[in-house]
Image (cartoon, grey):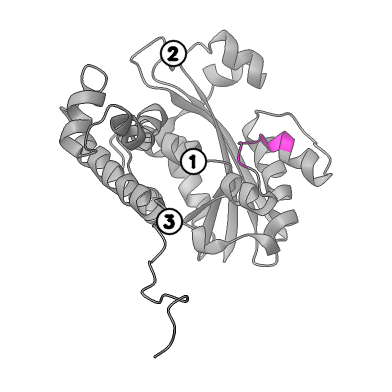
Amino acid sequence: MDYIVLDIEFNGRKFASELPMEVIEIGATRLDASLQFVDEYTAFIKPVYFAKLNHFIQKKTGIPQESIDTAANFPKVITDFLGWLDRSEKVLLVTWGGEDMKRIILDTRMHKLDDAYWMTTPYFDLLKGFLRVKGLTNDVSVEGALKELGLSSEGAAHRALDDARMTADIFKSVFTELDFSKTQYYKDMYTNAKERRLIKNAIRLLRSQKLEPTWESFVEHVLKDKVSLENPKKAAEMRSYFEAELVKKVESTPRPPKSSNTNQDEPHQ
């Protein structure tokens, strides 16, 4: 088993455009089963949309525009990267959060390439693993985790290969405490974080309005004019989340103590 610690950088205008965000840099480091460094991979990618780096991304990453202008396109780079990955007989991808897997898969599909490798290769979200180990509830950055562990932060933050190296240092530091039963496979999601929070609070919200918390009442009184359910996959996912949350609420409701039929004051016959 080799561990591939992966990081990507991407460009675009997430909230100001309907055009997709695109991967512009991939960085990865390979650790063997003993967590020893084997080799690493790095490449820039020339995007289809927004060929010019936006100011925020350029300032955040420090990536020169010239490096993007002269880079190969996504199909060429991802083919090279898959070739590099195939040097390992068996791998576990390690990421800091779930965004890296999502962005690679979305770009793979955008270019009409086969996404089978990414959908069938297990990955471990080290951010969630780190939070569990430390008993934290709020997300932390790679730099924050390094500081928490007393590790030095070398390289440039928000550059793919340097971030992969630093993430690998975190992985090695907490490896024996990680719960690898939380290893997962990428799953398409049709809801966003805001919608999932809405679902999480739905039962309490409906009850505060003296309404029975059913899917139908949720759609009518909570989702109306807020979220479109035209996509059947999104509707099914939201309903599944709602029903799971309803079960959780029922299970967490305190039950009244059982009454006893024994009257201790009654004299024995």
Q: Specify whether residue 141 is painted magenta.
A: yes
Tell me which label, 1 or 2, sits earlier in the chain.
Answer: 2
Q: Could you tell me which secondary element the residue under label 3 belongs to?
A: loop
**Residue 173, horizontal then vertical, whole percent:** 75, 55
* Above/below status of 232 relative to 223: below
Tag 1: Cα neighbours inside 10 Å, few (<14), some, or many (≥20)?
some
Asked whether 164 or 39 is in front, the reply is: 164
Circle 2: residue type: Phe
Q: Distance between the residues labelled 2 and 3?
A: 30 Å
User: Residue placed at 61% from the left, 14% from the top?
Assistant: 58
Circle 3 residue: 121
User: Residue placed at 22% from the left, 16% from the top?
Assistant: 225
User: Residue placed at 17% from the left, 26% from the top?
Assistant: 220
Q: Give the range drawn in magenta.
A: 137-144
Asked whether 243 or 121 is in front, the reply is: 243
Classify the position of the N terminus by image quarter.
bottom right
Circle 3: residue type: Thr
* Above/below status of 130 relative to 48: below
Left or right placement of residue 32 versus residue 91 in this view:
right
Circle 1: residue type: Gly
Which dot marks residue 190? none
Tell me which label, 3 or 1, sits earlier in the chain.
Answer: 1
Q: Could you tell me which secondary element the residue under label 2 belongs to?
A: loop
